Amino acid sequence: MSGYEEQLHTGAEMLEETSELAAAVTAILDGAAGAGLDPRAIISLRAAITELDPAGGAPPGYQAGSRTDRRPGSGYGSDAEFLEAVSDAEDQALDWLRDTGQLQEQVIAALDVAHDDRDRAQRDLQTARQDLAAAYAMPTKKDCDGRHGRKAAAITAAEAAIAAAEERIRDAERRIGICEDTTEILDSLTRRLQAALQALRQVPHDLGEVYELVYAFIRRGGKMPRPGRWITGETPVPA
């Protein structure tokens, strides 16, 4: 037995540790706070962190300051910069999800092989038991005619075949158990990653909804009076 199933399980445990992704999204949240982004626009970011770091409990707090202290110089310099960071995090989560899917396919294949091995071993066990019964039923007369030796050899061979088949069954069942445990890890991970992706993809919509009036003003040709802490404006030219 090569330990292949154990390798798959270890790979699943490594993928299950998504704190790296959670840290990337938390960094975006910090940048949003530094930019003074409205708390309503980052609700989905906080939801993504919760999915990516379930052991961490509630996502980190968010304090963007008040209207009076929203000044240039910290956090994201524009909405485009903020959304680019969100898009990068989405790409990372998507790559993670693809790796998880590929590992799931390998686990399913290994599980199928283990089931097939167990089925073959069970058939071999049945055959060996039949052979043992037949060996015990072999007639014997005198030691000199060799039948005692043949019967003893047949019994020994059948018993060895039974032991080997039973060992193969135990091994296959152990491998099946490992694959099933690995599948549970990957299924849970897949659900968390999908939920995190959905949350990240919601961020642009939330941003547009919260700042709908600001965007409408800019589309009509309006200019911000100074560089905002998250929307790039133009500093008025002195007269």
Image (cartoon, rainbow, N blue to C red):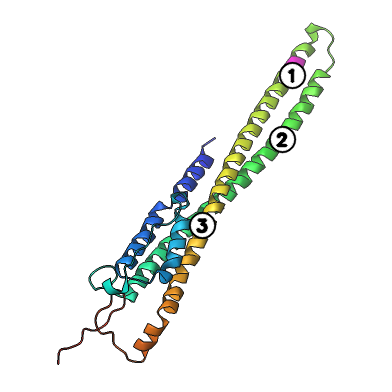
User: Which one is earlier in the sequence, the residue at label 1 or at label 2?
Assistant: 2
Disc 1 and disc 3 in contact, CB within 8 angstroms = no
Give the residue pinned by disc 3.
192
Residue 33 in the image: state x and y as whole percent: 33, 66
Q: Is residue 72 left or right of residue 6?
A: left
Question: Measured along the vertical axis of the image, is residue 225 above or below residue 187?
Answer: below
- For the record, the magenta segment spans 150-155
Residue found 43% across the figure and 53% down from its top: 18
Amino acid bearing label 1: Ile
Residue 155 in the image: state x and y as whole percent: 74, 19
Q: Is residue 136 left or right of residue 96?
A: right
Residue found 74% across the figure and 15% down from its top: 152
Q: Is residue 147 left or right of residue 27?
A: right
Indicate which label's residue lies in the foreground, 1 or 2: 2
Residue 154: within the magenta?
Answer: yes
Question: Measured along the vertical axis of the image, is residue 129 above or below residue 179?
Answer: above
Question: Measured along the vertical axis of the image, is residue 155 above or below residue 85?
Answer: above
- Element under disc 1: helix
Q: CA distance from mark 2 to mark 3?
A: 38 Å
Q: Callout 3: few (<14), some (14-19), or many (20+) C-alpha neighbours within 10 Å? A: many
